[in-house]
Amino acid sequence: MNKKQTGILLVIIVFVVLITSIFFIQQASEKKGDTFPDLDTAKVDKVPEDFDYANQPVIGNREAPVKIVEFTDYKCPSCKKWTETVLPKLDQDYIQSGKAAVYVLDYPFLGPDSNLAALAGETLYQQNHEFFETYHKLMMEKQKNEKSNWATKDFLLNLVKEGIPGADLQQFEKDLDAGTYLQQMKKDKEIGKRLAIPGTPTIYVNGLPAENADYETVKALIEQELAK
């Protein structure tokens, strides 16, 4: 084998080694970031007959006479639209005045990272109830393609670190890894299954299902309840 052939062979070997190394680095990175909670491991003794209002994260005053329930998935584009268009109108017209409050129930179904995103919200809520609303809105604001597993642990840790001042990041990570509040998340989904909800967002107003999630439909139900 002459020097030219030897040089070509060495270039090929280096190229193959480089490509192989990149592949394994990417694989290791994906495995590290893509560990998601399994809802099947959570045991729920009894599915509540109502919406379990007392244990749900709420946007607004719990004493409000009108209770709006939103079943959500943080990867759901329609949930993002609802949070950014309908919720602000409800806030202005009913939530700030104490007439209504929105209770957020998890219904993760679009991907394995939907479970982790929901668990993160539940974990923050348990750490400090006031953290939840900020997390909820930030997740919708930063939502990515629903077909990709973007809501990884690293993504969530960074979001909490940068977007939720005062959160105990170490405790958050510990509870997230342990799945400390997985049972509550599973309970939410079982409530949704019991009601046979068609998807997300699904809205209820004082237990009455809204045919659509648009503002006018929800508003009509709120006004109906306030008139009683």
Image (cartoon, helix red, strand yellow):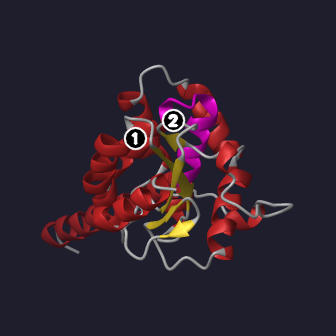
Secondary structure at numbered mark 2? loop
Q: Is residue 38 left or right of residue 128?
A: right
Q: Are marks 2 and 1 in contact (CB under 8 Å)?
A: yes
Q: Which residue is mark 2?
A: 61
Q: Quadrant of the N terminus?
A: bottom left
Q: Which residue is mark 1?
A: 95
Residue at the farthest front position: 228
- The circle drawn on residue 13 is none
Residue 11 versus residue 75: which sits nearer the camera?
75
Q: Is residue 140 left or right of residue 149?
A: left
The residue stretch that appears in magenta: 118-131
Residue 219 versus residue 141: which sits nearer the camera?
219
- Tell me if mark 2 has few (under 14), some (14-19) or many (20+) residues whose alpha carbon lies within 10 angstroms of its own: some
Q: Is residue 147 magenta?
A: no
Residue 64 versus residue 190: which sits nearer the camera?
64
Which residue appears at 52% of the width and 41% of the height?
Answer: 64
Residue at the farthest right position: 45
Give whichever of discs 2 and 1 has the lower sequence position.
2
> The disc labelled 2 sits on which kind of residue?
Asn
Which residue appears at 46% of the width and 52% of the height?
Answer: 226
Q: Is residue 120 magenta?
A: yes
Whether residue 51 is visible: yes
- Decide: is 125 above or below 84: above
Q: How would you classify the magenta stretch by its main secondary structure?
A: helix
Which residue appears at 78% of the width and 64% of the height?
Answer: 47
- Decide: is 157 above or below 200: above
Which residue appears at 37% of the width and 44% of the height?
Answer: 94
- Tell me if mark 1 has few (under 14), some (14-19) or many (20+) residues whose alpha carbon lies within 10 angstroms of its own: many
Residue at the farthest left position: 4
Q: Position of residue 91 (x, y in %)?
A: 34, 43
> The disc labelled 1 sits on which kind of residue?
Ile
